[in-house]
Image: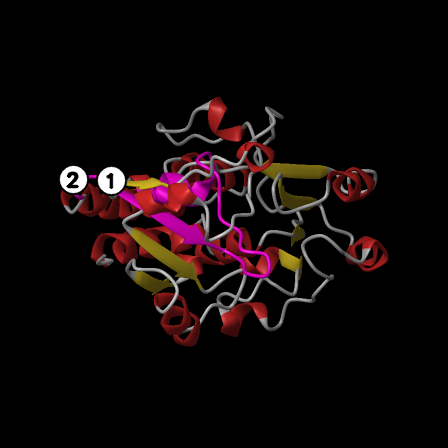
Amino acid sequence: MNSDPQFTASMLADAIGVQHEAVALNAPVRIVCLVPSITELLCDLGLAPWLVGRTGFCIHPKAVVSDIPKIGGTKDVNIGKIRQLAPTHLIVNIDENEKPTVEELAQFIPHVIVTHPITPMDNLALFRLLGAIFNVLPKAQQLCAAFEANLLRVHRDADATPKNILYCIWKDPWMTVSHDTYIAHTLALRGWQHWQTKQVEQISKRYPIFEWDDTSLQEIDAVLLSTEPYSFTHLHVEQLKQTIQKPVILVDGEMLSWYGSRAIAGLAYLAALEI
């Protein structure tokens, strides 16, 4: 067990309540990560030498991950290739990875760590979870301190008057996010309330489809076009400005939707974002 005085057993419980054990010192560790933002986090925790597999969407940090084998996408992984890599640990996410795939991988991977950050504050538990399991808790605590420092900056720069924001993640059809997503909770740190569709068939969906003729869109103060997962560009911004009479801003999707260590820079980005 970890001897760090700040260590608690709760740090070893993942998103579905499974209690994990810290790896034994000098034990062989082979990690396959199916979550792009967490692959980046593992590298920032100094665990890149233990990474033996990643998805094709795990692109950061580029110079480091280029040497780590790709095992498919987040939802269409190559099970056979992963088996050949003989991982000891698999890291997945409830939203990004398919449950049947994870269950199949769990048949031959001893340790499956499930993640599911819903709010930016969940990053603190995520840092400590991975830090405790892989014996890099001091580095994890450094990330926590950096996160909390940038969080203070966001709170300082939060809008005194709340704004209603529409965050777009796709077009043809146009799609946004629901109020219980990581993105919506991130925007809320600035005092920005995310617009919610009133279309009955879309209300319960995590990523609702909407139409620009929805009368409730009159309530919004600005539209944010994200660079991911759809690759919105400045051209889309100019085109949309001709359609609606609202401010339209292109935003870095990684900064506002990636949890993990990217969220630290994401908070600074959020604090500086002007609408």
Residue 261 at x, y = what percent? Answer: 41, 52
Residue at image mark 2: 161
Q: Is residue 16 above or below residue 256?
A: above
Type of amino acid under label 2 = Thr
Q: Residues within 10 Å of mark 2 (few under 14, many from 20)?
A: few
Secondary structure found at label 2? loop
Q: Quadrant of residue 102?
A: top right
Marks 2 and 1: which is nearer the front? Answer: 2
Query: How many numbered discs, if any?
Result: 2
Highlighted magenta segment, given as a residue range: 159-187
Secondary structure state at the residue bearing disc 1? loop
Q: Position of residue 30 (x, y in %)?
A: 67, 52
Instruction: Please give the residue where the numbered disc 1 appears in the rendered image.
Output: 191
Q: Is residue 160 visible?
A: yes
Q: Which percent across, then down, holds residue 196?
A: 43, 38
| Three-letter amino acid code of the residue under disc 1 | Gly
The outermost residue toward the right is: 80
Are discs 2 and 1 less than 8 Å apart at CB? yes
| x 33%, y 62%: residue | 248
Determine which quarter of the picture holds residue 245: bottom left
- Residue 261 in view of the camera: no
At x 61% / y 27%, what residue is drawn? Answer: 16
The C terminus appears in which quarter of the rendering?
A: bottom left
Residue 247 in the magenta stretch? The answer is: no
As drawn, is 161 to the left or to the right of 20?
left
